[in-house]
Amino acid sequence: MGDDVLKELDETRPGMCTMKAIAGSFVWWPNIDANIQKKVADCSLRQAVQSAPSKAFVYPWSYPSKPWSRVHVDYAGPVNSAMY
């Protein structure tokens, strides 16, 4: 059921959550979520370009040679039009 609707929803290759959200705004039928999941899982193009999170580069900080030789600062704001 809804093959034409699924094809239309899938046209721009949105992610599964986006596709479900769009579908939920306009259409409904029994097992629509399962149908969308199957459509996304069966898409070879999506599976080929699915990105894994990139690995974070770990940079080991050198140990400071003396107190206050390295200071790390965080910024907050704007708070009352000022940065802290």
Image (cartoon, grey):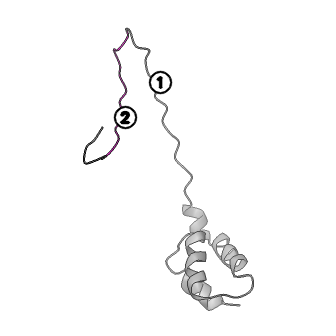
Q: List x then y, in percent, for residue 30.
A: 74, 86
Closest to the observer, 34 or 78? 78
Location of the C terminus (image quadrant) = top left
Q: Is residue 7 above or below residue 63?
A: below
Q: Which residue is mark 2?
A: 74
Task: Tell me where residue 81 appears, x and y as whole percent.
Answer: 25, 48
Whole-angstrom CA distance, mark 1 to mark 2, is: 19 Å
Name the residue tied to disc 1.
Answer: 60
- Crowding at dot 1, Cα within 10 Å, few <14 / some 14-19 / many 20+, comes out as few
Queried whether the magenta region covers residue 69, the answer comes back as yes
> Looking at this rendering, what residue extends furthest in the top direction?
66
State which quadrant residue 48 falls in.
bottom right
Name the dominant secondary structure of the magenta segment. loop
Number of the front mark, 1 or 2: 2
Q: Residue furthest left?
A: 81
Sequence-wise, the earlier of marks 1 and 2 is 1
Q: Position of residue 34 (x, y in %)?
A: 72, 76
Provide the residue span drawn in magenta: 67-77
- Dot 1 amino acid type: Pro
Q: Is residue 17 magenta?
A: no
Horizontal and vertical percent position of residue 11: 52, 81
**Residue 64 against residue 34 in the figure, above or below:** above
Three-letter amino acid code at disc 2? Asp
Q: What is the number of the mark on residue 15? A: none
In terms of depth relative to the viewer, which is nearer, 61 or 12?
61
Name the residue located 43 percent from the left edge and 17 percent from the top edge: 62
Rendered view: 17 above or below 74: below
User: Which secondary structure lies at badge 2?
Assistant: loop
- Locate residue 65: give its quadrant: top left
Residue drawn 44% across and 14% down?
63
Q: Is residue 2 above or below residue 48?
A: below
